[in-house]
Amino acid sequence: MKKIIINIIIFIFLTTLSMYAQEERKKFRFNPSIGMSIPYSDFAKDNMEYDAGFSSVGLNINSDIMWYWGKYFGLSLDLGYTNLFFKKKAYKSEYERILEQSDGIEVLAGNYQVAHSSLGLIIKTPEFYNTEVLTIGRLGFSYCIHPEILVTDEYWGVINSIKQDDAISIISSLNFRINHYISEKYGISIYFNTYSTNPRFSDKTSIENGFNLYIAYYSINAGFIIRF
């Protein structure tokens, strides 16, 4: 009889421990995604104004690790990389407008690149119909690369040149996300995100030997999510 009681107690203990462990695992989420990045504000301007970025639509990859506590709150750590194209045609058109000529000018330019890591607070709804809605505010660091730009004229030669440079700066983001689970462990995730950072790049040809560029872009992403 004692053996039976001990076995029952052990069974209950192990079952409870297993359920608790499963519940603990469900607090974590891993969410890799890919999406489109869209610049805005001065970063997207394509005329020769101060702080104009001549940036165009690009692509990004991102990974989130989320930890929930309770039904309404959590923490989020994300890592991401964004590549944004440079508007070479618009840049060329501005030089043609300023110099009042229609041909002979060539523009060579790379892309903007931003790698980031940030940590933030999650505010979420309780899960309903296998779905949850999240708002996430984050703050972190970014590593930004300004592309090399070379403008030449067939008669005058090099008109303007900016060397590729990199800089580290603080980045902030605000994320609106919907997660929908198709099983106990797996689901799909779609979200809209805003990023902004203000790195300072070196430019030895300028009076101040450098310039700040406000980099701001939206991202629209889709990916899968794993509960564990």
Image: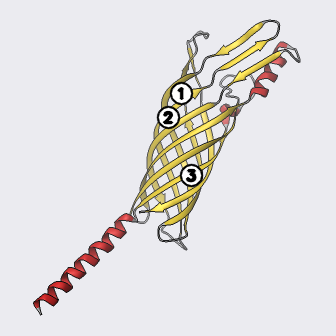
Q: Residue furthest top?
A: 156
Q: Residue furthest front?
A: 3
Task: Please report the residue visible at 34 percent of the width from the left and 65 percent of the height from the top.
Answer: 24
What quarter of the picture does the N terminus occupy? Answer: bottom left
Compared to 153, does 216 lie above or below?
below
User: What is the distance, in whole Å, between disc 3 and disc 2 at their CAs?
Assistant: 19 Å
| First of labels 1, 3 by sequence position | 3
Q: Nearer the viewer, mark 3 or mark 2?
A: 3
Task: Please report the residue visible at 52 percent of the width from the left and 42 percent of the height from the top.
Answer: 80
- Which of the pair 63/47 is nearer the observer? 63
Element assignment for label 3: strand
Which label sits on residue 142?
A: 2
Q: Is residue 105 left or right of residue 146?
A: right
Q: Residue furthest bottom?
A: 1
As shown in the figure, which amino acid type bears the numbered disc 2? Answer: Ser
Task: Please report the residue visible at 64 percent of the width from the left and 21 percent of the height from the top.
Answer: 148
Q: Position of residue 85 (x, y in %)?
A: 68, 33
Compared to 202, does 40 lie above or below?
below
Q: Nearer the viewer, mark 1 or mark 3?
A: 3
Badge 1, how many Cα within 10 Å: few under 14, some, many 20+? many
User: What is the distance, in whole Å, between disc 2 and disc 1 at their CAs?
Assistant: 9 Å
Compared to 61, does 199 lie above or below?
above
- Which of the pair 148/142 is nearer the observer? 148
* Residue 228: quarter of image: bottom left
Badge 3, how many Cα within 10 Å: few under 14, some, many 20+? many
User: Which residue is disc 3 drawn over?
Assistant: 33
Badge 2, how many Cα within 10 Å: few under 14, some, many 20+? many
User: Which residue is disc 1 drawn over?
Assistant: 199
